[in-house]
Image (cartoon, helix red, strand yellow):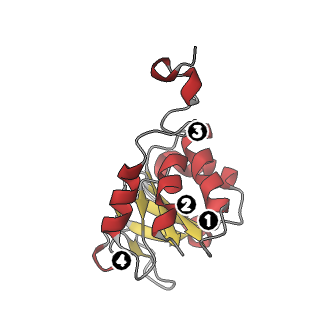
Amino acid sequence: MNFIDPLHDDWTPWADGEPGTPLPNRLLTWAQWQQVREQWPADVPVGVAFPNDADIEALEPDLPRIALVALHFPKWTDGRAYSQARLLRNRYRFSGQVRATGDVVVDMVPLLHRTGFDAAVLREGQSAEVARRLLAHFPAYYQGDVHERQPRFRRPEGAVA
């Protein structure tokens, strides 16, 4: 899991009113992407900040052209972005970066990882070092996830007699 420092992020939000020339590593809102998707060159890396109350299926046709999908947690208790991430990874086989943004706290990190996130912007006051330790705390899980689809009892090393 990569923890993003917002002050040193390689991805720059595309401001409304910015010149229409596509630049690499621009992070567009879903609305901005819908306006420019037809003109955006396939060889220019683009990221899309996707709302958590929209159907992720709407993004599916564009996924081969997108390098980053940022999924938003308006509150840490709102888990819709977990489902979006899992769908991106399992159903749509998205191999680009899936980033958690918004009210992301350290306690969320193991589930973020298990559902397909590979990057996160932690809420102010949260420690990336504590998050890394938390990721290493549990060596395995009983349930399947995006990394290991089989539940533990179905895996050869975890088979129950």
Name the outermost residue toward the bottom.
Answer: 17
| Displayed quadrant of residue 149 | top right
The quadrant of the rendering that contains the N terminus is bottom left
Number of other residues with Cα within 10 Å of mark 3, as a class: few under 14, some 14 to 19, many 20 or more = some
Mark 2 to mark 4 CA distance (whole Å): 25 Å
Q: Which residue is mark 2?
A: 37
Q: Which residue is mark 4?
A: 6
Q: Which residue is mark 3?
A: 90
Name which of mark 1 and mark 3 comes first in the sequence.
1
Q: Are marks 2 and 3 in contact (CB under 8 Å)?
A: no
Q: Are marks 2 and 4 in contact (CB under 8 Å)?
A: no
Name which of mark 4 and mark 1 comes first in the sequence.
4
Q: Position of residue 77 (x, y in %)?
A: 65, 70
For the point 49% across and 45% down, the residue is 64
For the point 57% across and 19% down, the residue is 160
Q: Secondary structure at mark 1?
A: helix
Please state which of residues 57 and 127 is positioned toward the viewer in this rendering.
127
